[in-house]
Amino acid sequence: MAATDTTPGTDSIRVPAASGAVLSRKDSRIIWLLLGAAFVAILNETTMGVAIPHLIGDLGITAVEAQWLTTAFMLTMAVVIPISGFLLQRFTTRTVFVAAMSLFSLGTLIAFLSPGFPLLVVARVVQATGTAIMMPLLMTTIMTLVPSNIRGRMMGRVSIVISLAPAIGPSLSGLLLDSVGWRWIFGIILPIALISLAVGARWIQNIGEPTHAPIDVPSIILSAFGFGGIVFGLSQIGGAATHGSASEVAAADAMSTITLIASFSVGVVALGVFVWRQLLLQRTDRALLDMRVFRSLNFSLSIAQMGLLSLAFFGAITVVPLYMQSVLQVSALETGLVVLPGALAMGLTGPLIGRIYDRWGTRVLLIPGSIVVSGMLWTYTTFDEFTSVLVIAVAQTVLSLGLALSFTPLFTASLGSLTPRFYSYGSAVVGTVQQVAGAAGIALMITIMAAVTATNVESGASEVAAGAIGAQAAFTIAALVSLPLIVGAFFIRKPADQPFPAHAAH
């Protein structure tokens, strides 16, 4: 059972349970509240893609401008997530939760009331600031409160949130867009967010004891330019090749190339200086993102595996709806329904996969999971203009099951390889890698699809046939990226169950 510090003059502090203990009702309630808040945040994140065509017409903006609604969100996530490790160390759990959900709720309110495009972009930035903190907070709390012998099944519940929210988001967005308009995407989410904020503020207790290290402002600036520059550069790769006529694309491509080189140059240099500064600061426990997490080989291998998986998956899953709508000529609703069974299967099997991890470890899950993921991505390379929607739905469902076999053990094994004081930093690294790798996969796959499609159109192929060839090229890259996953699956281990001394919580 988790203990409570009742020192006079302080908030009650939850401390970790001993290894082998049973999760208490209070700790379970805290985790469920965080799961609910994370679900709302991810649901919001996945509704915007379907809404962008409507926003272009309603707000009188161009497609390039509309892209900033997702680019600004992604950039903010990339900047804030690396800082979240320090925030979780420096401030109490309740403070971080209330701040994150307040920011998310405020951003949602601004979006709902927004009279035009500029304020809507601001709203997305405010939303992203809160969203970026929620997942690291959830992962750190699970690692701190949940005994190591049942962490897998709890991480399986996280997979429900990660998979069901993206499945519901586009369908909900489409329904609201067709009936009451884009504002109500935010209008539906707002009361749910406010309820989560009120309930969480009432019931969430503080976990561990916060440190008092001063925040390093130069590290924040370097992190913003480093991760932000790289992600912005990646967004430029995908953007220039997909908007406007041929002449407009050519003109935009020249400017985009300059922006891309500048963004990457700034990002790489700033990231290098950021890492160097963290190595210096961590000697006195003042790092914004402590690099000592990479001293664990198992953590480093798990993070590398997760990065490759995110790059291949997010890239491929972005190409699928483009392929279906441009090549197979199916509706947005049909596209959403194709993705839905896989997302549901991934979510519903999460707890079972977690139990298997707790009982038998990583290999029994990661090895078949990586083989299934790679096999399905190679199957995607055979999709053409004649492929049945049913075949795609089946392939998508099997791919989702392979992902479920991979993500849950990777989450659990990576963070479980760290000592409790590094959980918050490890959670920040996990989130950052997913964000940057996902952005890289999306930019790479869309660019390849657009470039190959354009080349084949110029060679005389029909737009449908050229689109199919472009999609096959993008899927081939994803399939090639997936091959190292099979090798990596043999080297990742389930960490030995660790005891949880109260003083090591933070």
Image: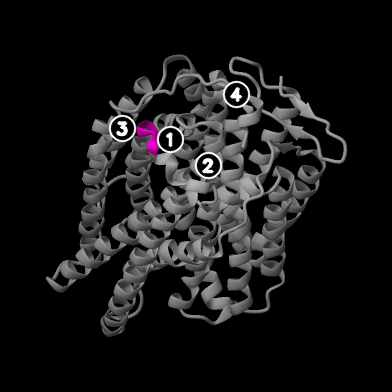
* Amino acid type shown at disc 2: Ile
Q: Are marks 1 and 2 in contact (CB under 8 Å)?
A: yes
Residue at image coords 20%, 57%: 469
Give left or right: position of 158 versus 305: right
Above or below residue 53? Residue 494 is above
Q: Is residue 476 visible?
A: yes
In space, the residues marked 4 and 1 are separated at their CA atoms by 24 Å
* Amino acid type shown at disc 4: Phe
Q: Is residue 184 visible?
A: no
Give the numbered dot on residue 296. Answer: none
- Disc 4 or 1, which lies upstream in sequence? 1
Please name the residue that numbered disc 1 is placed on: 407
Give left or right: position of 441 versus 34: left
Magenta residues? Answer: 295-299
In space, the residues marked 3 and 4 are separated at their CA atoms by 32 Å
**Closer to us: mark 4 or mark 2?**
4
Asked whether 206 or 30 is in front, the reply is 206
Please name the residue that numbered disc 2 is placed on: 162
**Closer to us: mark 1 or mark 2?**
1
* Amino acid type shown at disc 3: Ser
Above or below residue 358? Residue 332 is below
Residue at image coords 83%, 31%: 6
* Amino acid type shown at disc 1: Phe
- Disc 4 or 2, which lies upstream in sequence? 2
